[in-house]
Each structure stands twice: as C-alpha cells, then as structure tokens.
Image (tube, grey):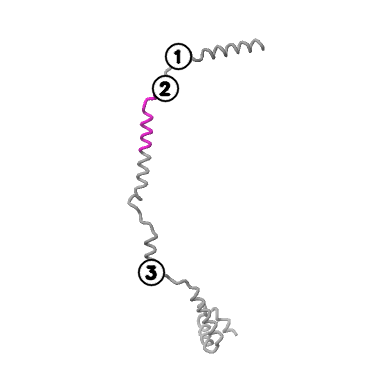
Amino acid sequence: MKYCEDLMLYASGELDGPRKEAFRQHLQVCASCRAELKLLQRTDEALAAAAAPGSVVEELFAKTTRRKSFFAGWKPALAGTALLGLGLLMFLGGLQPDKTAFDASEVIAYMSENLDDEYLSFSNDLALFEQEF
C-alpha cells in the first residue's frame, strides 16, 4: 500500500534515490498504479499549453509592435522650442509702450466733466443727513 501512496510523488518527479527505484519495481507488478500513472501523464499533457512555433511568434511580434517615427525623438525639442518662443513673445510684448494709460491731465478732465453732478448730489445728500441728525 505504501507504494501506491508514492504515485503522486513519482508522477510529479519528487521521488528520489531508493524510493524512486522501489516504486519503479512496484509499477512492473501493479497494473492499477500503471493505469493511474498513465492517466496522470495524459492529463498533464492535455493541460500543458502548446507552444507556438518561433516563426509565428516573431511574425506576430513584428506586426503588433510600433516602430518609432522619425519625429518621436524630436517631440521634446520641439515642445521646448515652442515654449521658448512663447516666452520670448511675452517678454517682447511687455516691452511695448502701454497705449491705454492715461496721463494725469486726461484723468482730471474726465472727472471734472462727468463727475461734477455726482459730487454735488453727494454733497447735498450729506448736508441733508447732517441736518437731520
């Protein structure tokens, strides 16, 4: 009975030395162990994945991998150049004189033309408020 317990160890290649040799001798006389061993071996073969031929693997690999384009190495350099150009344009744009700035005389003229009525109205409202309180 001990020999039959070694069947799985023998089938998986884990038996060594005298136990392995003893089990081989047992297989010569035990038809049940031979049949079970054959079944285990056929099962292992059926479950083992079949390897594709090397030429098929190489062909698939060649079709599915991307080749680097000529511009792939230039992308960082082009992006850096574009950023440098943008920074230069912003710098040069900042050096242009500001055409929207008013000088003091224009501001005073605008205020005196447009705000006199508002200042008078505010002054009158303030005077009325002071009279009531």
- Between 69 and 77, the one nearer to me in the picture: 69
- Left or right of residue 35: residue 73: left
* Label at residue 54: 3
- Residue in the image at 50% along x and 73% along y: 47
Q: What residue does disc 2 label?
A: 101
- Left or right of residue 12: residue 55: left
Q: What residue does disc 1 label?
A: 109
In the rendered view, tell whether residue 80 sits above or below residue 44. Answer: above
* Label at residue 30: none
In the rendered view, tell whether residue 112 sits above or below residue 54. Answer: above
Q: Say which label, 1 or 2, has the lower sequence index.
A: 2
Q: Name which residue type carries label 3.
A: Gly
Q: Range of the magenta residues? A: 85-101
Determine crowd level at label 2: few under 14, some 14-19, many 20+ residues with C-alpha closer than 10 A.
Answer: few
Disc 2 secondary structure class: loop
Q: Would residue 99 be counted in the magenta stretch? A: yes
